[in-house]
């Protein structure tokens, strides 16, 4: 796989406004976690997406936050780990939205 920065630039710098946002987010995470294998979190996100019954924001939010267990950090919004999709998805971010 090309360098994470090169792949990210190619992905988001293309002519199409439609690109794999999940892959782009995981490429950002690879800067903090160089050994990250994106295949695992991408497969988990695909599994969550398959469970979304409609394309409404509420359905997507339910799949991510309720079914998928994603959480937000209301204590320290500036924590850079909230930018690492693998940390958020794995539960290493333990802050709740409530």
Image (cartoon, rainbow, N blue to C red):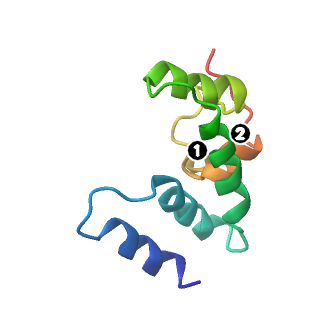
Q: Which residue, as the protein is rendered here, is positioned at the far bottom? A: 2
Q: Is 6 situated above or below 36?
A: below
Which is more N-terminal, label 1 or label 2? 1
Query: What residue is pinned by disc 2?
Result: 93
Q: Nearer the viewer, residue 14 or 53?
A: 53
Q: Which residue is painted at 23% across and 68% down in the image?
A: 15
Position of the C terminus, as image quadrant, is: top right
Relative image position of residue 68 (x, y in whole percent):
70, 33
Specify the quadrant of the image occupied by residue 94.
top right
Q: Is 2 situated above or below 14?
A: below
Query: What residue is pinned by disc 1?
Result: 82
Q: Which residue is painted at 46% across and 77% down in the image?
A: 7
Relative image position of residue 9 (x, y in whole percent):
37, 73
Position of the N terminus, as image quadrant, is: bottom right
Q: Is 21 situated above or below 59?
A: below
Find numbered disc 2 in the image and state the secondary structure of the residue it sits on: loop
Specify the quadrant of the image occupied by residue 17.
bottom left
Left or right: where 89 falls relative to 56: right
User: Mark 1: few, some, or many residues within 10 Å (few <14, many ≥20)?
Assistant: some
Find numbered disc 1 in the image and state the secondary structure of the residue it sits on: helix
Relative image position of residue 13 (x, y in whole percent):
29, 70
Q: Is 10 situated above or below 42?
A: below
Q: Which mark is residue 37?
A: none
Relative image position of residue 93 (x, y in whole percent):
71, 39
Q: Which residue is painted at 39% across and 69% down in the image?
A: 11
Q: Tell me, yes or no, whether the two marked residues, 2 and 1, touch with CB atoms within 8 Å.
A: yes
Q: Which residue, as the protein is rendered here, is positioned at the far top? A: 98
User: Mark 2: few, some, or many residues within 10 Å (few <14, many ≥20)?
Assistant: some
Specify the quadrant of the image occupied by residue 43.
bottom right
Q: Which residue is painted at 66% across and 30% down in the image?
A: 71
Disc 2/disc 1 C-alpha distance (Å): 7 Å
């Amino acid at each position: 796989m090309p360098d994470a920065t090169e792949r990210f630039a190619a992905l988001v710098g293309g002519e199409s406004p439609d690109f794999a946002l999940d892959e782009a987010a995981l490429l950002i995470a690879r800067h903090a976690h160089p050994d990250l294998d994106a295949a695992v979190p991408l497969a988990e996100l695909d599994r969550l997406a398959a469970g979304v019954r409609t394309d409404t924001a509420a359905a997507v939010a339910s799949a991510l936050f309720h079914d998928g267990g994603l959480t937000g950090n209301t204590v320290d919004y500036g924590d850079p780990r909230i930018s690492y999709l693998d940390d958020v998805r794995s539960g290493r971010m333990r802050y709740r939205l409530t």
